[in-house]
Amino acid sequence: MISRSTAAALVAVLGLPLLSVAGSSAAAPGPCGSVSTRPWCDRDLPPDRRAGLLVKALTLDEKLDLMAGDDALGPLSTEKNPDSHEGTVRGVPRLGVPTVLMAGGGPAGIRQGPGTAMPAPIALGAGFSAADAARYGRLVGDEGKRRGNDIVLGPALDILRLPTAGRGYESYGEDPYLTGSLGASWIRAAQKQGVMSMVKHYPANNQETDRYQVNAVIDSRTMREIYLPPFEAAVRGGRAAAVMCGYNRVNGKPSCSSGTFLGGVLRGSWGFQGFVASDWLVGAKNTAGSVHAGMDVEMPVGLVYGKNRLNEALREKKITRKQIDKRVRAYLRTLFAHGAFDRARYRDRPQTIDVAANNRTAQAVAENGITLLRNNGVLPLKGGASVAVIGSSADDYISGEGSSKVTPRNPITALEGIRARAGGSVTYTDGSSLAAASTAARRADVAVVVVSDAREEAEDLKCLSLKCGAPDREDQDALIRRVAAANRNTVVVMQTGGPVLTPWRNRTAGLVQAWYPGERGGTAIARVLYGDAEPGGRLPVTFPLTGVKTAKGGTVRYTERLQVGYRRYNARKLPVAYPFGHGLSYTKFKYSGLKVSGNRVQVTVTNTGGRVGSAVPQLYLTFPRGAGEPPRQLKGFKKVKLQPGRSKRVTFVLDKRSFSVWKNGWKTVRGCHTVEVGASSRQLPLSAKACR
């Protein structure tokens, strides 16, 4: 999405249209919900046929109107205004075409005034749970529907290529298999609530630096194996209704004018039957190019798809009426396929949102994503112990900034959560004085230092240190060192939107990665610290040992090719602070009995500790030498909750695609592949061969 400042400037300079859509708390029949003689209202006809009949009845002006949104102001007010929408495509009352409303936010909740601020998507990625992804998508879809929307703008399925990515918190991490699995589950659950899902930002939108013009130069194999699989899973597995093309260029072509990716891949290879919309205001860059490529709707208003521009392109024969019909038909077919013409339509019923239930879901997802990175036995904390909570981040609601930011109804900070749970004395020091922080730490049984970074849309981080990532806060690295020197029972809680550098980690007794944990994050953090809930997360990104490459503008060549994230570290045998997939528990697990039979891989997971806990067995595949693939690629994961002493036999199914690489098509690699199963990408005690 476009930044507020850029959008506001364009609205003022260009005099863009503003539209107010009145809400109604009562249900109204859909356009085809009552008896109608209109032929496209025949529900026995397939969606494509219904759309074709309607296209024939539309005038040219009406068709052109449907190719662009109608409200430039909406995106500027959704965070605070419950009556606004992120986008609006006005209908055609004469023929019963409905006005379609798009929700503010999407990836982390609905942002139409205060709403349920979910944990950042990166926390969902850390949960390694398709079931949690479904709970997340179900909540966003339901709340979006009850806010009067037809479409939710999510999930974001961009791979976290750069650890410094400003919007890294909106992603599910650095792995395409994990991202695609969670995204498809999210989409299916959201769309079952009666809304459409618009996945974004297609394709290969991986940085904010120079984000409106950056040209990502990516070879076809890398594109197919790393950056496209999450979107393919969204289309084929999730049946996503819509796809948003991004601001960036790919191999010299604007994403919204790329016949290769919109036509050849999306609609051709994957059989996508929904519609394609541009990212907001400057996503589409060329009228004829976008029409030819397959972009159906420009949002939030028509700049390149304005009537004058489209009519001019028709007069100059740069586009044809047949192409206009094709674009409009794709949009209308989607509305028919997802019931927008047939179901009862509501306009804003926020009073029916189950706030308490949604808060419970937000808290559970946060707990399941909180990742324990280090523990020398200090955790879980004992009730009654005196606790010094230190750091300004403890007394602040921490979230990412940008178009996915949701205003929480009643957020609980880490400090509030700990105070409510502790059962003993709790002191608070904001960390602005290292001397005061040191004194507070010495006087307590346990010191809990809460730190954060500051990720936002439109700007990538300049580096991964806490000092660089949150320049407006105290020197958090120095604060941790000082507190750890004063109290050997120092636990650091990090509320960050991605990986950060942890040069002080070995001086601490415990290290907890809480991500941006949402509006019930403080309660979730406290419950994990005190052992009321287990730290359920595993890292969906690598935490590097030292500094990493930062984003550049202009033409960006993806010279690392397939070696993205943990693939690079494993291929080059580089040390890391914490590897992809890592996460400790308050109990212990044993992996045994690995068996490979055809496409089935089985392993036994046993809880050998004294507490209930969730294991996350992960399956990694290494291709035969000569295949040109990085080692240890994630091809399966399961989350398994076990009582002490109990075991479970876990089955993974590897399909033909698992053993394939892209060489002008998917080709199965013959030979013996190495199958490894364990607790992380670098803790894999079990190994066997799978030969094709």
Image (spheres, rainbow, N blue to C red):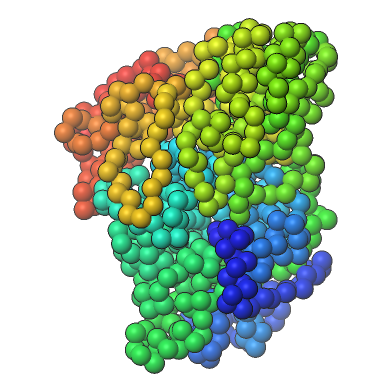
Query: In the picture provided, is 135 more to the left or to the right than 691?
Result: right
- x, y percentage for residue 264? 31, 64
Residue at figure coordinates x 56%, y 86% from the top left: 62
- x, y percentage for residue 334? 52, 69
Residue at figure coordinates x 55%, y 11% from the top left: 507
248 relative to 222, above or below: below
620 relative to 70, above or below: above
Q: Residue furthest left?
A: 626
Q: Quadrant of residue 508?
A: top right
* Closest to the observer, 618 or 630: 630
Q: Quadrant of residue 33?
A: bottom right
Q: Quadrant of the N terminus?
A: bottom right
Residue 581 in view in this figure: no
Residue at figure coordinates x 71%, y 22% from the top left: 433
- Count of numbered badges drawn on the protein: 0
- x, y percentage for residue 63? 52, 84
Query: In the picture provided, is 255 more to the left or to the right than 624?
Result: right
- x, y percentage for residue 180? 45, 45
* Closest to the observer, 36 or 426: 426
Residue 417 in view in this figure: yes
Q: Quadrant of the C terminus?
A: top left
